[in-house]
Image (cartoon, rainbow, N blue to C red):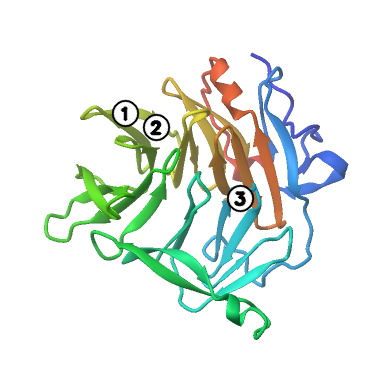
Amino acid sequence: MRYKNLIIIFILLFSTFVYAEKLHFIPRTVIVLPETSLVKIKWILVPGDKDRPPDVSSENIQFVVDYKNNPLIAYSGKLLFNPLSGYIVKFNQPFKEMICLDNGVLIFSDGRAVYYIDIDNEKLEKTDIPQASLKQIATLPFNDGRIFKGSGNSLYAVARNSKTGKYEIFLFNPLRKNFNRILVSNKPVNALTGTGSHLFLATGRQIEEFLNDKRRLFYEHPREDILELFYSNEAGVFYKTSHGIGFVKDGNSLEFLQSDNPEVFLKGASMFVFFSNAMAVLDLVNLDDLKNYSFKVLKIVDINKTF
């Protein structure tokens, strides 16, 4: 199988920049796709320096896409803004995590509970920045729990049980508004996705699949730890490391994007990628087409050695 030479529409060979529509550049970024792939690349937000927050490091940025495909960026757990419209909201209490379910519901967590956003319309014209509060939906099973998005509207929580030392995984029941335990793991869970009780777990460099009470090795990255996992029924399983994004099939991967820790949001067959170092958002559409290829990548190049 042939690949386009480091493409993102077109690529300058051996360049340290991605070359794309209208000569927009993303530093230290390459995209490699099968030459006949139906995957297309669209700009949602072109690179620029306008309205950038003072610190756009990954520790301060969270990224989701709403039901209208608008990018939403949370900054330092206090501000939420839409870079397309310029709309910004300030929270009266900090949060640690933010996810957006496929039905468009925004979920926030402070490690103790999950919340939805509530904006006081009466105060909209009284303040320069609209104020928002968090209204509790349900408590998390343990303190310092983490939440993860699955396919559809699956919402998961993971926490370490201090009494047993094991990691417990829970699935949210929207009717009863509580979390039901579905798995106990002896290994730390760095990332999680899935649909219902069908899970994909990341520990270190490995991804494991849990289905019908059976657990198996799904994929092992040759170099880096898996930081995030993404899954949709349409497109399949994707992972993110500190320098790459890849698609997994039959125990092999195609690491089709390499960059410095971009933020990722998978929605159906589309993947939205936010490059905080350039305040740019790309939309990779038709990602489900990657399922049609049989590939085996023997070596994944280290981006730090590439540039």
Residue 205 makes an appearance in the image: no
Tell me if label 2 and label 1 are in contact, CB under 8 Å. yes
Return the disc, 3 or 1, that comes first in the chain's sequence: 1
Q: Which residue is mark 1?
A: 217
Locate residue 283: give its quadrant. Answer: top right
Q: Are marks 3 and 2 in contact (CB under 8 Å)?
A: no
Q: How many numbered dots are placed on residues in this image?
A: 3
SS assignment at label 1: strand
Residue pointed to by mark 2: 220
> Which label's residue is closer to the chain start, 3 or 2?
2
Left or right relative to 45: residue 95 = left
Real-space CA distance between mark 3 and mark 2, rounded to the nearest whole angstrom: 21 Å
Mark 2 Cα within 10 Å, few/some/many (few <14, many 20+)?
Answer: many
Q: Residue 199: horizontal and vertical position, in percent?
A: 33, 36
What's the CA distance linking mark 2 and mark 1? 8 Å
x, y (%) of residue 194? 38, 37
Q: CA distance from mark 3 to mark 1?
A: 27 Å
Is 109 rendered above or below residue 269? Answer: below
Residue 218 x/y as whole percent: 36, 28
Residue identifier under label 3: 260
Q: Is residue 257 above or below residue 90?
A: above
Report the amino acid beneath label 2: Glu
